[in-house]
Amino acid sequence: MGLDDGVRELLRQPMKEFHFTIPVKMDDGSTKIFKAYRIKHNDARGPAKGGIRFHPHETVDTVRALSMWMTWKCAVVDIPLGGGKGGVICDPRHMSLLEQERLCRGYIRQSYHQIGPNIDVPAPDVMTNGQHMLWMLDEYETISGGRYPGVITGKPVGMGGSLGRTEATGYGVIYMLKNLLKAEGIKLRNTTASIQGFGNVAEYAARLYSKMGGKVICISCWNQDDGVAYTFRKKDGCDIEQLVSIKDSYGSIDKDKAKEFGYEVLPASAWLSEEVDILIPAALENQITPSVLADISNSVKVICEAANGPVTPDCDDEIAGRGIKLIPDFLCNAGGVICSYFEQVQGNTNYYWGNDEVFDKLSTAMSNAFHAVYITSKEKELQMRDAAYTIAVSRVVDAVKKRGWV
Ligand code: NAD
């Protein structure tokens, strides 16, 4: 991109890092000290935005990398936010709810001056949820003495959360797909898809895709009892509502009930080799690697990276060489962060929108982002991932230069 050294040096690392400890009184009377982080990669375009993860293997490097990813994600969809991320090294699965509450409140007490509606706006991430966000919000408001619902997103609806947030990431994936198919002259209602995952993202993507007339042939998900994943297939199209009715809260489909409903139960990897038009990896990172590329059917025209990092970057050239269009993760799954931005706006104005308004605005934002990337990829003869990064980085560079930082 021809960036000068100062710009590269600035963008290569987070601008601010806060490392702190949180002492928590445990239920057995002992005190545990948890290591925590809040990192701001870049806030030239607006307040930083990004989740807080609770994980026993959390590392400062993961938080750094994810904060940078948030900068590019917010920039590529052109929302006026920067990139941030937080984390606590802990395992909430082995903590009581009261201990978790004390940890959340402790996180805010230690980072109070670093966050705020106009500074840095946290959200849920791995192993954190709406309840954790509410405890954090309450602690923030207790210290500040005011009501600031825009300081944190991912809150439950009715307590400052936005309608549509549950659906936003999955729906956003399909808004992207719809735009791409239209640009490529393919009718969505004539297409078939195979999906990996049946959690939050995959479920709502599958629902909207089917509602628009597409046919989901395969869904692959994890089976806790057997410790393996399976692919559930129905050649004439899965009934998504029926599968939702037999899945648990972790996104696992009941194998026996699926068989009763006439689904074939196939090995985990079968979803990838199915003869469909569209692949939607919506479960985990590193699922499509060079060693499995040959398994992808020649019928596949589009891969939607609904999960974060499901296709390893060393696959990009071969995928492009086969004429498959790939919608890159940080564009494809940005519906979630766009809706979090909407939640922040609604919180800051204390005025909440209806479902239709949220989905209309989400669809418009995703379409605008898609067209900017698609046009750039055509004009500069770039793959969509490179086009998306070019746009995102350019916008941040423009902001840091206009502010006179470099
Ligand atoms: P989730 O926990 O709700 O669902 C995960 C799904 O993956 C489950 O259905 C599970 O059975 C399945 N799965 C796990 N291991 C599998 C395996 N080996 N093979 C097949 N299926 C497997 O998670 P989610 O919120 O839907 O997130 C999915 C991905 O999307 C993640 O990469 C996440 O980081 C990313 N993402 C999520 C959001 C969001 O708003 N939820 C936003 C952006 C990105």
Image (cartoon, helix red, strand yellow):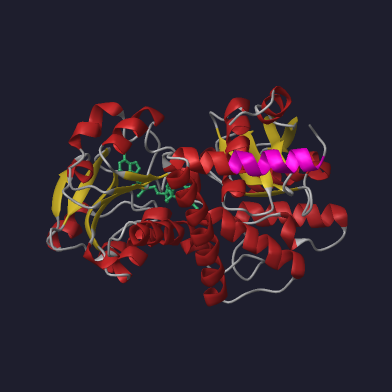
Q: Find residue 216 and report its image quarter.
A: bottom left
Please name whichever residue, 112 or 183, is drawn nearer the observer in this view of the structure.
183
Please name whichever residue, 214 or 253, is drawn nearer the observer in this view of the structure.
214
Residue at point 73%, 25% (across, down) = 6
Q: Is residue 61 above or below residue 326?
A: above
249 relative to 157 in the view: left or right:
left
The chief SS type of the magenta part is helix
Q: Say whether residue 267 is visible.
A: no
Residue 297, image x, y percentages: 18, 42
127 relative to 200 in the view: left or right:
right
Q: Find residue 64 and report its image quarter.
A: top right
Q: Say whether residue 17 is visible.
A: yes
Is residue 240 in the magenta section?
no
Q: Is residue 308 above or below residue 375?
A: above
Residue 165, image x, y percentages: 53, 62
Residue at point 63%, 37% (across, down) = 67
Residue 212, image x, y percentages: 32, 70
Name the residue at the right extreme. 145
Image quadrant holding the C terminus, namely top right
Q: Is residue 379 above or below residue 137?
A: above
Residue at point 70%, 64% (across, down) = 345
Please name whichever residue, 21 or 157, is drawn nearer the observer in this view of the structure.
157
Residue 369, image x, y percentages: 53, 55
Extent of the magenta region: 392-403
Name the residue at the front extreme. 379
Image quadrant holding the N terminus, namely top right
270 relative to 30 in the view: left or right:
left
